[in-house]
Structure formats: C-alpha cells, structure tokens
Amino acid sequence: MDTRRFTITALLTALAIIIPFAVFFKVIIPPFTATLGSHVPMFLSMFIGPWAAIMVGLGSALGFFMNLGPLIGARAFMHVFVALAGSVLLKKGFSFWAVVLITAPLHGLLEVLVVYPFVDYNAYNLFIITGVGTMLHHCVDAAISYVLMKLLNKSRVYYFAGV
C-alpha cells in the first residue's frame, strides 16, 4: 500500500472511531440503533482495498465499543466483514450500487446474528427492526457516501473509480 492510500486509510479509521462520539443524530429502536454516517468511512475504504476495509471496520468497532458498549461494538465489528466483501466485489468490477445492494442483506443478517443471543426472541424485533433497519441505514449511508465520493472525485483529492 502506498503512502497516500495508507494515510487515507488512517484518516478513515480515525473518522470511524470518532463518529460514534461526534454524531448526535441517532435512531434508537431497541435492539436496533443507527448513527447517521457511521457507514461512510466503511464505504470509502472499500475503494482503497481489502486491508483498508478491515482497518476501518476495526476502527468502527472500537469507536462504538468505547462509546456505546460491547453489544453495539460487536454489531459495528460486522463492518469488517461487510467492507471486506464490498472491497473484493469492487476489485472484481462490480459497480458501487451493485456492491451496496449485495452487501446490504449481508450487513443486516450479520447484525441480526450478533443481537440474537441478547434479546428475547421476537421475530419482528430481530428481523424487521434490526435486520431491515440495518439494511435501510446501510443504504442511506451509501447515498451519503456516493455524494461525498462524487465531490472528492471533482476535487481530485482521491479518485473513486466507478462512481
């Protein structure tokens, strides 16, 4: 990894750690929580490569663990796997929106699996609130990421191919 990509990875990781502390717009419908913008570093890291995606996912898990506790930190740890899958798909030539649509159900399922042992089994809370809620949050943050990537492409700070 070259110095530029390494630096951008470090900045995205720092952003992923800070977002849980800095963003005040949160949706909380137990067992689901959503922090607006928390997936943006994850989406951006997918374009840098698999190692960047893993690092940013770990940063996200650390930030949420420190701010909101172990369960939310464990949910955020799933960003590692979602970002890694997205990065591999981008390397294989999938478009950004195809990656978003493919990884959304994976993201929702992984978060359902994380909360399952800790909630009273209620299919509605588990699959609709947590699973579908996560997928919707994933897509909203993807739209924010897309706009940001378009702006960054115009500024020539970093070029996100296929956006």
Image: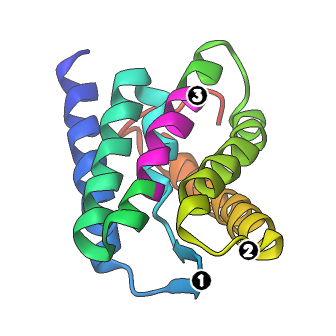
Q: Earlier in the sequence, mark 2 or mark 1?
A: 1
Residue 85 in sight: yes
Instruction: For marks 1 and 3, give the CA distance.
Output: 27 Å
Pointers 1 and 3 in contact (C-beta within 8 Å): no
Q: Quadrant of the C terminus?
A: top right
Residue sitting at 31 percent across and 71 percent down?
A: 69
Nearest the eye: 153 or 79: 79
Label 1 crowd (10 A; few <14 / some 14-19 / many >=20): few
Disc 2 target residue: 129
Instruction: For marks 2 and 3, give the CA distance.
Output: 24 Å
Q: Earlier in the sequence, mark 2 or mark 3?
A: 3
Nearest the eye: 84 or 29: 29
Pointers 2 and 1 in contact (C-beta within 8 Å): yes
Q: Secondary structure at mark 1?
A: loop
Disc 1 target residue: 30
Q: Seen in the image, is 45 located left or right of residue 94?
A: left
Where is residue 126 drawn, in percent x and y?
72, 67
Instruction: For marks 2 and 1, give the CA distance.
Output: 8 Å
Residue sitting at 28 percent across and 27 percent down?
A: 5
Label 2 crowd (10 A; few <14 / some 14-19 / many >=20): some
Quadrant housing residue 9: top left
Mark 2: which amino acid?
Answer: Ile
Label 3 crowd (10 A; few <14 / some 14-19 / many >=20): many
Residue 49 in sight: no
Where is residue 1 drawn, in percent x and y?
26, 15
Mark 1: which amino acid?
Answer: Pro
Of circles 2 and 3, which is in front? 2
Q: Seen in the image, is 57 located left or right of residue 66?
A: right
Residue 85 disc label: 3
Provide the residue span drawn in magenta.
75-86
